[in-house]
Structures are given as C-alpha cells and as structure tokens.
Amino acid sequence: DVKVTQSSRYLVKRTGEKVFLECVQDMDHENMFWYRQDPGLGLRLIYFSYDVKMKEKGDIPEGYSVSREKKERFSLILESASTNQTSMYLCASSTNRGGDYGYTFGSGTRLTVV
Amino acid sequence: QKEVEQNSGPLSVPEGAIASLNCTYSDRGSQSFFWYRQYSGKSPELIMFIYSNGDKEDGRFTAQLNKASQYVSLLIRDSQPSDSATYLCAVRRDYKLSFGAGTTVTVRA
C-alpha cells in the first residue's frame, strides 16, 4: 500500500526552538509538498520539491526552510519557532507518471508552539 | 479573489439524499481537478479527479466540470452517515494543487 509517513503525530515546542518535521514516502514519487492547514484558511502550500535537491517556495514560505537530500525524504524546518506557526502540517507526494498528479497525504503533524 | 472557492457549509442532508457540493476557481490554466474527503482529525484522501468537461462517475460519487464557467461540482448519491466529513476541492496547475477551504457535510440518520 502506498505510504507517506510523517515522523510525529503531535509535537509541542517552545518559542525560538529549531524544529524539524520529517516526511518519507515509499512510492518513488518525484514530487513532494509541505502544507499547513488552519481552520477557515484551508491548506496553504509552504514549499515543494520536484526532484532531489530541488526546492521551490510556495505561498507562505516565510519562517520555513526545507531539505531534500534523498528522493524519498522531504524535511520541513522551522528556523525559530513562533506561536503563529502552531498548526497542522501535512506532507504530500505525487508522481508525474500516470497523468493525474493527485497527491497522497501523510497523516499530519499537529505542532503546538508555546 | 481566492484561487479556489467553496461554500463552507455546513451542508446537512438526510440519509439517502443527494449531497451537492460546488467549487469555483480563478485560474483558467488549471489542468485537472480533484475532490478530497477529510474526516475530523485525519488527513485528506482522494475521492476522484476530473480533467475533461462533463461528468465522471465513480460509485455513488459524480464529479462535474465546466471549464467555461470555471466550475466543478461533486454529487454524492444515497448519502450515508459515513459520508459526514469535510470535502476539499483542489485544482492543479503544473505540479501544484491549490485547495479550497472545504465544505463540511453532515448526513443525518
């Protein structure tokens, strides 16, 4: 079965901490994405990557960075966590093969910054 | 103007009825269109996608696309309590999907 795995389901971090969110997919997908989801705002794209070592800014990249050293792993980094980064973070992957480009999502990480 | 707009709901329908969800999008270059279902506390799961004008049916679900009107809809026939969820419309341009805020559907027994 197709899998996108996010390393933590729940995280609580302190303001100013550096936070790493990990995402691994086992489907040999080329494209990987990080979104955050907030009530009333829907899913907003933070960063995405369409190849190893490639990254592109999404709609809300400020305060975040990413790393993709291997095809299967895409990490989101909060350089200095702030309370307005409290959110649900969703990783997704997709493939250019097959034509539909639909995403498969991970189970999400609910991050609370205190 | 938001890129993808949906009625937020909630939409309440009796069991066995048809639930109708609507979505409009602003980018005429959008290439394909998706409906995701998200249960409370869970991540979105793909229901179906459509890329040509007209209807596409999959079981109890029918997606409809009208590119001229920039409109996508989802019909859920014979609604069941298990269909109670938030439904997200998404549109694709190149690699990326843009999502609407979702419509919450409640199916009452």
Image (spheres, rainbow, N blue to C red):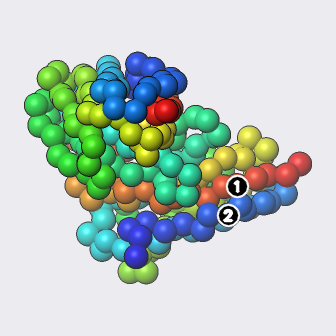
- Earlier in the chain: of badge 2 and badge 1, it is 2
Residue drawn at x 38%, y 43% as measured from the top left:
A35
> Would you call the spot at circle 1 few (<14 residues within 10 Å), some (14-19), or many (20 or more)?
many
Residue under label 1, please give it. B105
Report whether residue B49 is seen.
Answer: no
The disc label shown at residue A82, or none: none
Residue drawn at x 34%, y 32% as measured from the top left:
A16
Q: How many marks?
A: 2
The disc label shown at residue B9, or none: 2
Q: Secondary structure at mark 1?
A: strand
Instruction: Examine the rendered structure and indicate whether residue A60 appears above or below residue B65.
Output: above
Callouts 2 and 1 close, C-beta under 8 Å:
yes
Q: Position of residue A31 (x, y in %)?
A: 24, 37
> Would you call the spot at circle 2 few (<14 residues within 10 Å), some (14-19), or many (20 or more)?
few
Q: A95 and B11: which one is in front? A: B11
Q: Position of residue A65 (x, y in %)?
A: 22, 37
Q: Chain of mark 2?
A: B
Q: Chain of mark 1?
A: B
Q: Secondary structure at mark 2?
A: loop
Same chain assignment for discs 2 and 1: yes
Residue occupying the far right of the picture: B109
Q: Which amino acid type corresponds to the residue marked 2 in the rendered image? A: Gly
